[in-house]
Image (tube, grey):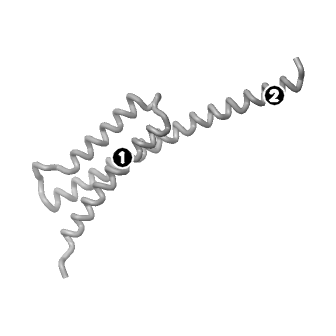
Amino acid sequence: MNPILLSCLLATLAVAVFMWVNRIARRQRAVRDILDAADALEDRLRTARAEIEAVAGSQDEDPVQEAMKEMLRHRLWLRDHGNAASLSELRGVREGIEVARARIERQLDRIDEARAPTA
């Protein structure tokens, strides 16, 4: 076989392997980011529940409960579909978790405002 052709084939193969490994690394990073965001949200939700109960006591309506369920749905989706999901789908899940976190932060801000003495 022609040495130049062989070199080109080997270079093409090396590029293909590199691209494949890079894609796997991006997927693993995306999944790890989702799990880290879910863990952070869960921690924040526990704090939020304690804050809300401290201000309002136990209520029939639990705003944290819905966020916990949403987070669980994201985790289950990731478990069931994460291996076959596109990077775009994984980013969408991450964004959904961030939206839930932002909602809880807004609720906690309202609690802080309610606690603040009026001037």
Q: Do the residues labelled 2 and 1 touch (CB within 8 Å)?
A: no
Residue drawn 81% across the image and 28% down it: 8
Kind of element beneath mark 2: helix
Kind of element beneath mark 1: helix
Residue 62 in the image: x percent, y percent?
17, 49
Q: Give the number of callouts.
A: 2
Residue drawn 71% across the image and 33% down it: 15
Residue 118 in the image: x percent, y percent?
18, 78
The quadrant in which residue 69 appears is top left
Give the amino acid at mark 2: Cys
Crowd rating for badge 2 (residues with CA inside 10 Å; few <14, some 14–19, many 20+):
few
Residue drawn 12% across the image and 57% down it: 57
Give the amino acid at mark 1: Ile
Residue placed most toward the observer, 28 or 89: 89
Image-based side of 34 in relation to 13, left or right = left
Question: What residue sits right under mark 1 in the picture?
Answer: 97
Image-based side of 9 in relation to 17, left or right = right
Image quarter of the C terminus: bottom left
Question: What residue sits right under mark 2 in the picture?
Answer: 8
Q: State the CA–CA distance, disc 2 to disc 1.
A: 45 Å
Q: Of the residues tagged 2 and 1, which is closer to the observer?
A: 2
Residue 26 in the image: x percent, y percent?
55, 39
Image-based side of 84 in relation to 46, left or right = right
